[in-house]
Image: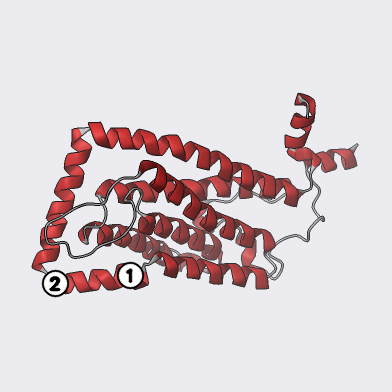
Amino acid sequence: MGVRDMAGFLDPGRYGPDRRLGMRMLLAVAAFAVAAVPFGLVLLLVEAHWPPALRLDRDTAEDLHQQALAHPALVSVLRVLTDMVWDPVTMRLLTVLLVVWLLLRRAWRLAAWAAVTVAASGLVGLLVKTVVARTRPSLPDPVAHAPGFSFPSGHAMTAATCCAVLLLVLLPMVPRRWRPLPWAVAVVSVAGVGYTRVALGVHWLSDVVGGWLLGLAVVAATTAAFEAWRTDVGRRRTAPTEGIAPEVRSSDPEPPVGDCPGPRDARRVAG
């Protein structure tokens, strides 16, 4: 395939809106996955050579560990929260239910966005965790144990991704005056996950922050692709405060496949 053929293949104007959506989502995920590898390596070097970051991790872990040792009842509550309420399996099951609901409403593209975003987040997190290979905290009298590597926190990354997906999809269904409530629930859940992981001594503070940032970065990448599709089919861009697809609350959340011409098709019609 020559340069001209490759350029034609990557030109989104030659495809219909749904194929452009798929190409953009795949390219966004692939580009982010590649960018996450050097990010993890750079962060590993920073953690290994920058004493302030190591000191903050160590001091935070020791302080919260002492609190856990002094309050056994708190440890029991944290275990329930991290192993059941905010467990990655629970979070992903919620998004599976969301995808099923979207499919029942015939919101095919929105369902694809939600599924791809959550799946991509898990794969990218696993990739970075494997590349960085950071060991978990080793504390005296540990109150909890967890297998695998430490950076980034899978719990924190999953919480950030799933809460963002749930918010962006369901926010249009919530009356405007009540919208601060789901935002508050999402923020408390994401922050709470981070606290439980550090307080139980299974992650460093930087693991949690890294998981939050990486999860939100995946959401941002796939959301950009979805917004590009909305532009292709003639729908306006949205703000995070109103959700990713306000039309989801209507009886016809998405235009039928093939009914909306792309930019190049529109130019042909106009000509």
42 or 115, nearer to the observer:
42
Considering the image in quadrants, where does the N terminus appear?
top right
Residue at 11% of width from left, 57% of height from top?
Answer: 140
Q: Can residue 53 be seen in this snapshot? A: yes
- SS for tag 2? helix
Tag 2: Cα neighbours inside 10 Å, few (<14), some, or many (≥20)?
few
Residue 233 visible somewhere in the drawing: no
Among numbered discs 2 and 1, the one appearing first in the sequence: 2
Q: Quadrant of residue 116?
A: bottom right
Note whether 38 is above or below 266 in the view shown. above
In this rendered view, identify the residue nearer to me: 98 or 53. 53
Specify whether 19 is left or right of 145: right
Tell me which residue sits at (53%, 57%) in the image: 119
Viewer-closest of 39 and 112 = 39
Q: Which residue is mark 2?
A: 72
Picture coordinates of residue 114, whole percent (x, y): 57, 59
Q: Label 2 is placed on what type of residue?
A: Pro
Specify the quadrant that holds the C terminus: top right
On screen, residue 209 versus residue 253, left or right, reads left
Q: Which mark is residue 23?
A: none
Residue 263 position, x and y percent, is 78, 41
Q: Is residue 124 left or right of residue 9?
A: left
Name the amino acid, label 1: Asp
Residue at left offset 54%, top offset 45%: 221
Question: In the rendered image, which residue does mark 1 sit on?
Answer: 83
Q: Are marks 2 and 1 in contact (CB under 8 Å)?
A: no
**Crowding near the residue tagged with mark 1, few <14, some 14–19, many ≥20 C-alpha atoms within 10 Å:** some
Residue 188 position in % (x across, y down): 33, 62
